[in-house]
């Protein structure tokens, strides 16, 4: 196993009865909470009242910022920073999906830098990248099982004016506390539940396939997360109120990107994420997980056709589907694609309204923002022209009618 250093400072409260202790821990971080929410779901479902009430009972003042959109927009984040400063809030509490959590991190970071009012120049690929190195304390309440933003140092934000989507990252963005209440995910629509499951899988798959094989424990961790998702997604689609399987998805999402699954093996680029972030930057109506799911089969086949990650695919075939023999790698891709189809996650980019005429520009954005300017690194070069080929190859993925 390789040497590593990881830092996981988040106190996690998991369960349907952990709101009061969570609120008490927020009260140790500050006196006035800016609660950040999205487009209305968590308010309509009563979670905002529940969380705000618990924070108030723990002695906090509460100010609410509403209106973070999926693929959070930098201009909205800038408006939230102004509200943060006017209110005097000293701790930021996102209540929502990855978009809300990421926006809140950006608000906590920009809000800690006096005189700065625009977040976009600080993202990867822009002039002031990595200059945000401190943030107000954060305590996160995820309401989707997807991104693990409640434990990660990342915030992914969009800028519709330039069709861009990029990343902020600093250890100070890791929330000090997180409340994982499976009941807060029970009403997530089927499509968003599917998107989230695809995202969880990618967070362990990326490094499993392209990283080293030095850590058997990292492999087992990743395989366990994937097995849980393969089993639990169909259960919650069939029975959305199944809190046991909702809880497994929620915990799997945290475990997938909390730094443990990839510890001890050679790191790799997050290639699928680089391609997908470019796509959902260009098309902000595209959900991140949906974009990833759409790229999986075409990307996997592209790797296998070049003899890349062969043994890792074969191992996944054995561990997840009990496959053996010389064609286990190919059969893994077939089985995985069938699972996507059976769970509403198989489609072509064209089905999502993404125009072939844009493929080259999107690929160019991906290699410029996330690669070396010409290519990504997928156990060897993945140049912009090959990204276009992967996008085109999704056309053979037939959407499976559901229901
Ligand atoms: O806006 P509202 O009304 O809140 O509705 C949201 C939104 O429409 C809805 N929703 C959330 N919780 C719900 C709910 N509806 C009913 N019940 C609930 N409990 O779901 C929709 C999608 O929300 P969003 O936050 O966009 O989804 P997700 O959690 O998948 O987050 C995606 C974002 O996170 C980024 C993605 O790129 C994307 O921008 N990521 C963040 C990462 C990180 N910070 O570490 C890593 C990931 O790889 C990812 O890139
Ligand atoms: Zn992701």
Image (spheres, rainbow, N blue to C red):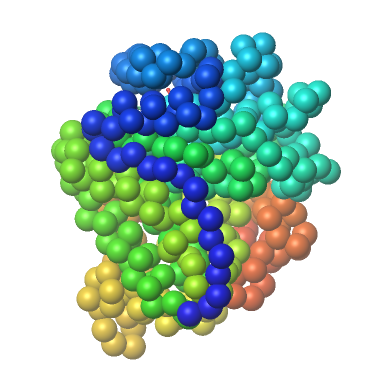
Q: Whole-percent x and y of residue 27? A: 46, 25
Q: Is residue 301 above or below residue 134?
A: below
Q: Is residue 213 above or below residue 185?
A: below
Q: Is residue 195 above or below residue 218?
A: above
Residue 254 visible, this angle: yes
Residue shown at the point (51%, 39%) measured from the top left: 175
Which quadrant holds the C terminus?
top left
Q: Nearer the viewer, residue 170 or 118?
A: 170
Residue shown at the point (38%, 73%) measured from the top left: 217
Instruction: Specify the quarter for ligand 1.
Output: top left
Number of callouts: 0
Residue shown at the point (33%, 52%) measured from the top left: 252
Q: Residue furthest bottom?
A: 326
Q: Is residue 142 left or right of residue 281?
A: left
Q: Whole-percent x and y of residue 151? A: 48, 46
Q: Whole-percent x and y of residue 293? A: 42, 52
Q: Nearer the viewer, residue 392 or 34?
A: 34
Q: Is residue 252 left or right of residue 392?
A: left
Q: Is residue 31 left or right of residue 169?
A: left
């Amino acid at each position: 196993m390789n040497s590593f250093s990881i830092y996981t400072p988040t106190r996690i409260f998991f369960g349907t009865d952990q709101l009061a202790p969570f609120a008490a821990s927020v009260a140790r971080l500050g006196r006035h909470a800016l609660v950040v929410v999205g487009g209305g779901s968590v308010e309509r479902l009563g979670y905002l009242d529940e969380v705000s009430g618990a924070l108030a009972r723990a002695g906090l003042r509460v100010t609410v910022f509403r209106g973070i959109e999926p693929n959070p927009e930098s201009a909205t984040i800038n408006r939230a920073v102004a509200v943060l400063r006017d209110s005097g809030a000293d701790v930021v509490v996102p209540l929502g999906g990855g978009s809300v959590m990421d926006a809140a991190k950006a608000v906590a970071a920009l809000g800690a830098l006096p005189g700065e009012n625009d977040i976009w120049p600080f993202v990867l690929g822009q002039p002031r990248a990595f200059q945000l190195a401190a943030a107000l304390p954060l305590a996160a309440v995820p309401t989707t099982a997807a991104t693990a933003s409640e434990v990660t140092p990342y915030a992914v934000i969009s800028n519709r004016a330039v069709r861009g989507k990029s990343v902020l990252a600093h250890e100070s963005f890791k929330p000090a506390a997180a409340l994982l209440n499976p009941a807060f995910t029970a009403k997530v629509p089927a499509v968003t539940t599917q998107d989230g499951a695809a995202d969880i899988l990618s967070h362990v798959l990326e490094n499993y396939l392209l990283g080293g094989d030095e850590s058997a424990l990292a492999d087992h961790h990743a395989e366990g997360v994937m097995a849980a998702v393969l089993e639990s997604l169909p259960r919650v689609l069939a029975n959305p109120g199944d809190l046991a399987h909702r809880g497994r998805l929620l915990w799997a999402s945290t475990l997938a990107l909390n730094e443990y699954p990839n510890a001890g093996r050679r790191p790799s680029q997050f290639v699928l994420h680089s391609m997908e972030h470019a796509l959902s930057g260009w098309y902000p109506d595209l959900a991140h997980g949906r974009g990833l799911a759409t790229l999986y089969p075409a990307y996997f086949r592209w790797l296998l056709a070049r003899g890349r990650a062969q043994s890792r695919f074969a191992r996944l075939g054995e561990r997840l589907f009990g496959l053996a023999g010389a064609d286990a790698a190919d059969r893994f891709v077939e089985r995985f694609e069938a699972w996507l189809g059976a769970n509403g996650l198989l489609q072509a980019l064209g089905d999502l309204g993404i125009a072939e005429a844009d493929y080259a520009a999107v690929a160019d954005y991906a290699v410029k923002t996330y690669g070396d300017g010409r290519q990504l690194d997928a156990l060897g070069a993945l140049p912009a022209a090959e990204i276009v080929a992967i996008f085109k190859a999704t056309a053979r993925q037939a959407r499976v009618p559901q229901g």
